[in-house]
Amino acid sequence: MLSIQNIHAAIEGKEILKGINLDIQPGEVHAIMGPNGSGKSTLASVLAGREEYEVTEGSIEFLGKNMLELSPEERAREGLFLAFQYPVEIPGVSTTNFIKSALNEKRKYHGLEPLDAVAFLKLMKEKMQLVEIDKALLTRSVNEGFSGGEKKKNEIFQMAMLEPKLTILDETDSGLDIDALRIVASGVNKLRSKDNAIIVITHYQRLLDYLQPDFVHVLYKGRIVKSGTKELALTLEDQGYDYIKEEFGATTI
Amino acid sequence: MAILQTAYIEEKFDTLQSSHPNVLLNEVRQKGFQTYQNVGIPSYKNEEWRYTPVSNLFKQSYSFSEKVSTINQASVDAFRLPDSATANELVFVNGLYNPLLSNIRSAANEMVIISMEEAANDIRFSDILKEHLGKSSLYLQDGIHALNTSFINGGVFVYVPKKVQVALPLYIYHIADTVQNPVLAQPRSLIYLAESAELKLVETYKTAGSSDSFTNEVMEVVVAGNAVFEYYKLQNDIAVANQVNTTHIRQIGKSYVHTVVVTLDGGMVRNNTNIIMETPGNEAHMYGLYLLKGNTHADNHTLVDNREPHCFSNELYKGVMDDATTGVFSGKIYVRPQAQKINAYQSNKNILLSEKASVNTKPQLEIFADDVKCSHGCTIGRLDEEALFYLRSRGIDAAQAKAMLLQAFANDVIEKIKIESLREHIETLIVNRLSVQIS
């Protein structure tokens, strides 16, 4: 589904990613962990198509297409979804209209008729229950005045509505209390299927306890330095990132 | 047709004065003309006109408020606002009130609409004119305003009696007929809301023809105690339609005023919106949106004069500047020494969409009382890139995302339009503009 080959990426001339390789198959959940500044969010940004990041080397194939040639909106319509670390507040744009536009753009791209108001509302209702989001939030402007937990729930709600093939959860656990984390994680689990894949970018183990990833990768200084199964995350939790730094710090600069 | 030079203007003035022997109007015009002669047309050195080179408009030839026009009902149809059949419609052609093209649908005991000349000769209204016509001159000692006053002719007087809430809005269409020649139009009106009266007024401007026009308008509004005045202005004229207009609203009793000024297209556009709070406890809300393309220049000068205590005013003006457009916002708030316990808020926010667009914004608070709450703020920036990316990351294309954000930005002002059909009309104009403009 996703094949990342030797990706190098820079922002403002500074190289952050220094040769990432990663293959993801449908149905898989991959966790990407690593200390601050290792390049985790850069990887998410490059995948989502943020234009301030320049890919200097390497290739990314997504569902058989050259992803680097696609605009952010085309990537989304192809089936990519980025759950933002810091969801943006957009005063004056209603959440419902926003999601409806997004959904119908995607349907149009795939040659489907736009959903009418009734069908859309029915779908909303169904997905709202799935992620336990308050209906009142959806009548407000996008994320405006939402608490941290509400913003993250809204991300998962959008994920539910748009039914992506590949989801990137960019530090979705940050700033969440234990209840919100449980709701968000259980929402994600309900959306898992054998046809879609998830990349979980996180600093900590606690979200992984709920999501149970198939693979764990450790990113350090712009490279994946270790890959393993979910037990690797537990090791990291026990030993911290220091042992990674010791093992790879000197040789990878 | 001639260039607006002093000798020509003097000749026109003498002709007007001798042909309309009404003492009251002659006196007001005479005073205006004296001011015009004393101060002349402002140059860029005049701080109030620094960014709006109005003197350029005086370098070319115009027909001088000619009555001759081919405008008829059918041509007005092209300009009508929505739901016009359930509105009172006043038509000015080249600055002159045209009763034949106007449709007054409210009953005579709900609202009186007559020409300024009739009002000056009508004992029911002549005292009102004597007291209030030309009062705005105290605030506008400039040649442009004085020029309008010098040529008060073919203006209109609107009177809403005590306790009458006029159900139908009053639409005023200003039509410049430039089919033959460029035109100078100088509409003048005096609106009087007696105690506990209510009126919704909408002004809009259109050019029939393709030549230049220069509309120099003065509307004076007097709002008595417990009255409610809603005022809307829509400017969406062609690129060679220039205008300076002054809406001077005086609250002579504790009353409520709500204004929304929307500028979408035109040439050089200057709006003076003044609210004078002459009694304690007045309340005013002022909103403005200028969403511009091409070379349009839009200048909004606002004034809130708190002359008495316990007044409240809130002001929000927003601008979206594309292409080579220029915007000006200047917001004056005066708080006189005796005007304690007032609240006055002002905000001006601008988005620049193009490298060539510019905006000058200047809040001016002059506070002489010590127990007041005043605030002001202004911003000039680009569209929020993070918000744009967020929308795009959900599959919404860049142009549509941009339009959504700009609509949301504009909506803070548009939602203040309380006449639903007008609000929807302007929303549609904006949606259409944004879908064409941004690609």
Image (cartoon, coloured by chain):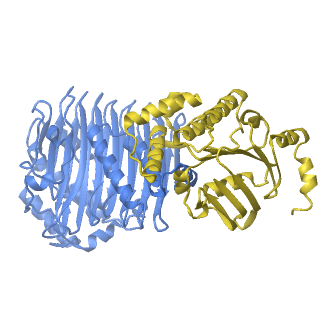
Chain colours: A yellow, B blue
Residue A221 occupies which quadrant of the picture? Answer: bottom right
Residue B380 drawn at (x, y percent): 52, 56
Residue at screen point 42% across, 64% down: B51
Q: Quadrant of the C terminus of chain A?
A: bottom right
Residue B386 drawn at (x, y percent): 58, 52
Residue A117 drawn at (x, y percent): 38, 36
Residue at screen point 41% across, 44% down: B411
Above or below — where is A88 with respect to A176? Answer: below
Evaluate whether residue A15 shows in this view.
Answer: yes
| A29 relative position to B52: left or right | right
Above or below — where is A172 with respect to B381? Answer: above
Nearest the eye: A160 or B288: A160
Total labels drawn: 0
Residue at screen point 29% across, 63% down: B38
Evaluate whether residue B139 shows in this view.
Answer: no
| B24 relative position to B220: left or right | left
| A225 relative position to B240: left or right | right
Residue B128 drawn at (x, y percent): 18, 38
Nearest the eye: B228 or B288: B288
Residue at screen point 11% across, 37% down: B105
| B431 relative position to A100: left or right | left
Nearest the eye: A250 or B405: A250
Above or below — where is B49 with respect to A155? Answer: below
Nearest the eye: A141 or B71: A141
Q: Residue furthest front?
A: A194
